[in-house]
Amino acid sequence: MEYPIPKKSAEAWQKHRSKSPQNPGLIFDRFAPDWGSSTDKEAKKKAFQDVEDVAKRVHTPLLSAWGARWEATVRNTNADPFSLRTDWRFIAGLGRKGPLEAGFTFHRYGFPMLPGSSVKGIARAYAWLVEERRESDPDFLTIFGRAPQKGEDESVAQSGRAVFFDAIPARLPKLELDIMNPHYPKYYQGKEPPTDSQSPIPVYFLTVAPNAEFRFAVGWRGPLDDETHRLRNLAKDWLIGGLTELGAGAKTSAGYGYFHK
């Protein structure tokens, strides 16, 4: 299989690809084969399977060291870490651009993660949609802050005092290959109406397997007293509510990305 990278890099990759440990994120982003010009119709699927296989051989002590640094960091910002498990499969970063078209979010060390910006968005969505809190609510404003609206002066901007950290695996998660199977590809390409004569074209993508444990943390800017402790815990409750009731990542409407305690 051809790789669209310098010849020496491709040779080094072929030489060391069967050895452990490896970084599945690096392979996913930089060492994807040239499936577009391949005569093998399964080339893209095999590329995803390569990443799935490599994910079983990552350097697990690195995950332990990363977890220890993560915990030290979050505890220094008044956070109380907690863990949740996935109900079913979980996908982060499906819409990211990449050589295999279907994206996935890896930390630079090669482990799946949910970025802190997404974690904050889940908590905010729960507060907004379920709790019906708005920026006029003092608790909501203090936790999340606000940006100036159109026509407002920059001086009204306020940063949120809650700090939402990246969610990281508690232990080595398993990756699984999944599939979407659009039945009317020409219709989705805008070429013709949906008809039964069109053949499905499988779309492969990576997921985190069910029952994967992830660690979350919500910190606080400034010292904790009774009031700020209440607000930090409220932000944590909103996050847990969002993860368990709204889901995280892609395809939540199809049951992906929900967590439980």
Image: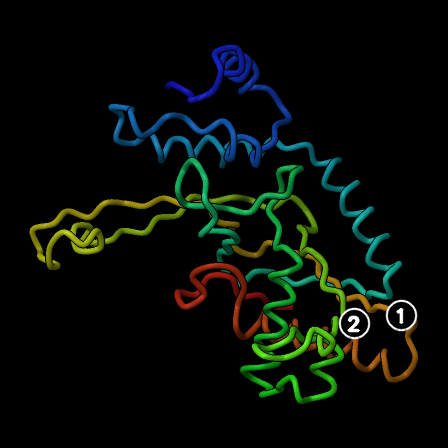
Q: Which residue is mark 1?
A: 222
Q: Which residue does the image show at 59% across and 79% down from the upper left?
A: 151
Task: In the rendered structure, find residue 75 and report the number of the disc placed on it.
Answer: none
Q: Above or below — where is 208 with respect to 144?
A: above
Q: Amino acid at mark 2?
A: Arg
Secondary structure at badge 2 equals loop
Looking at the picture, how far across and down is residue 139, in whole percent? 74, 84
Q: Amino acid at mark 1?
A: Gly
Q: Nearer the viewer, residue 249 or 19?
A: 249
Q: Above or below — where is 117 with respect to 23?
A: below
Q: Quadrant of residue 128?
A: bottom right
Q: Nearer the viewer, residue 46 or 191?
A: 191
- Decide which of tag 2 and tag 1 comes sooner along the chain: 2
Seen in the image, is 249 located left or right of residue 110?
A: left
Q: Which residue does the image show at 12% across and 59% down from the upper left?
A: 194
Residue density around tag 2, few if under 14, some if 14–19, many if 20 or more, within 10 Å: some
**Coloring applied to the structure:** rainbow
Count of labels shown?
2
Q: Which residue is mark 2?
A: 161
Residue density around tag 1, few if under 14, some if 14–19, many if 20 or more, within 10 Å: few
Q: Which residue does the image show at 53% across and 53% down from the upper left?
A: 92
Asked if the residues shown at circle 2 and circle 1 are in contact, with their CB atoms under 8 angstroms apart, the answer is: yes
Looking at the picture, how far across and down is residue 170, in whole percent? 70, 51
State which quarter of the image contains the C terminus. bottom right
Q: Quadrant of residue 224?
A: bottom right
Looking at the picture, how far across and down is residue 73, in whole percent? 84, 53
Looking at the picture, how far across and down is residue 120, in whole percent? 65, 67
Q: CA distance from mark 2 to mark 1?
A: 8 Å
Seen in the image, is 28 located left or right of residue 127?
A: left
Q: Quadrant of residue 187?
A: bottom left
Secondary structure at badge 1 equals loop
